[in-house]
Image: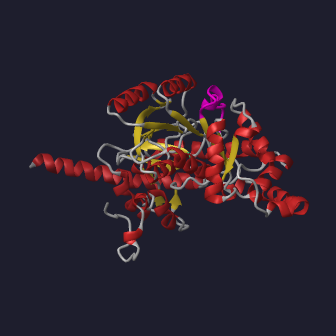
Amino acid sequence: MPNTTANKFDDWLDLYADRANTLSVSEVRALFAVVSRPEVVSLAGGMPYVHALPKDTIEKSFKKLMHDRGDLAIQYSGGQGDLTLRDQVRELMALEGIKSSVEDIVMTTGSQHGLDLISGLFLERGDVVLAEGPSYVGAIGIFRHYEAHVEHVETDNDGLQPEALEEAIKRLKAEGRKIKFLYLVPNFANPSGVTLAAKRRARIIELCRKNHILVLEDNPYGLLYFDKKVPNALRSMDDNVIYLGSFSKILAPGFRVGYVLCPPAIREKLVLAQESAILCPSAFSQMLISEYLAESDWQGQIETFRGVYRERRDAALDAMKEYLPKLSTTRPEGGFYLWITLPEGLDSKAMLPLAVKELVAYTPGTAFYGDGTGQNKLRICYSFPTPDNIKVGIKRLSNVINLQTELRDTFAKKGTKK
Ligand code: PMP
């Protein structure tokens, strides 16, 4: 297999595993260096607005932890994760209708790590993972790393379409393909911002159950709703659903703490995989979060986040209406993201350098598909910039899009004159 991403001066080219060829610089990460320049309005990376957190409360939790249980916090700990925190996670998941036992919860180093461990347990070269089209770029990267094929299933404003799922399963089975998972982000999805309608959830679970396909429910944004609570989790309807959660968006990603709730048989394997990979998740991070949850008004803090993100979502939608009224966009009811459809014929990846020149950045749609589609889509993340900057960013974006549309029309006219 030719190594397309490796540096030609790399002396170890002949030694890499084939798997290493699946690693390439993500379109999101490649942007970070450019967009961190202060003059650029970044609507690209999905960063939580951590400035809204009470740092003094976290500092108090830190001091109390070090004073009361400091030696334990900086020691190795159990592979399944801190028991007290697992119990708190149980309460957190109950907010979305999930009944669970601490026995079945495994703490991980962010939910990204949970996703990686689960993928490592199940995926082999050529296996199929069904995922929403579009889907979370970080998950697509992991599935590819395990050399699985990502098959996208069509979505609309109510999320994944059960009919499209049924059709995909039928077709893939007829082709003799092995489908291992359905991976989905049911609430305020990354990148589309849409939420899977309640009435579709049971149908999707039923289809997967009937076809012996594991459901991976990735839900980092569900508690960040603006007005209305999200429908109950898929996991609340079926104990065989593997549920991934995270403290990254409702607290802060720097702690790198996530969790997986899974059926007992899988949980045992998952803990072994975790111990083999990292011995144990960080006791320090887990105990600090546990202390924070016990001592602070964490629900009030999530309410603060909801207000911050609601205001930014409104700023983004208002700016879209003002500067790009003809473009269609999703209307998220929570979370971080807007998904925009460009005029026909425009390519968001090719347009990105022009946008950065105009001092605005976004993520091209192709990042969210494993099959190279999504050229005329782009993702805007409104969670981090101030509402004023969001407006400035979208105005700049409109300059680029309008210019590109004019150029497209000019070329089309020239073409018809010939
Ligand atoms: N899943 C989704 C849908 C995400 O958007 C992210 C982060 N952007 C993650 C998983 C990973 O989150 P973390 O590892 O920080 O918990």
Q: Position of residue 217 (x, y in %)?
A: 57, 37
Q: In this view, does 63 lie to the left or right of 245?
A: right
| Relative height, residue 209 to residue 325 (above, below) | above
Query: In the rendered view, how is the structure colored?
Result: secondary structure
Q: Visible in this render: residue 119?
A: yes
Q: Inspect the magenta stretch and tell me whether residue 237 lies in it.
A: yes
Q: In this view, does 1 lie to the left or right of 268?
A: left
Q: Where is residue 212 in the image (x, y as percent from the top left)?
A: 49, 29
* Image point (74%, 39%), residue name: 103
Q: Inspect the magenta stretch and tell me whether residue 141 lies in it.
A: no
Which quadrant does the N terminus fall into?
A: bottom left
* Image point (39%, 58%), residue name: 352
Asked whether 83 or 140 is in front, the reply is 83
* Image point (77%, 37%), residue name: 91
Q: In this view, does 138 lie to the left or right of 54?
A: left
Residue sticking out furthest to the left: 418
**Magenta stretch, main secondary structure class:** loop
Q: Where is residue 27 in the image (x, y as percent from the top left)?
A: 44, 58
User: What stretch of residues is rendered in magenta?
Assistant: 225-241
Q: Visible in this render: residue 299?
A: no
* Image point (34%, 64%), residue name: 3
Residue sticking out furthest to the right: 68
Asked whether 204 or 319 is in front, the reply is 204
| Relative height, residue 175 to residue 61 (above, below) | above
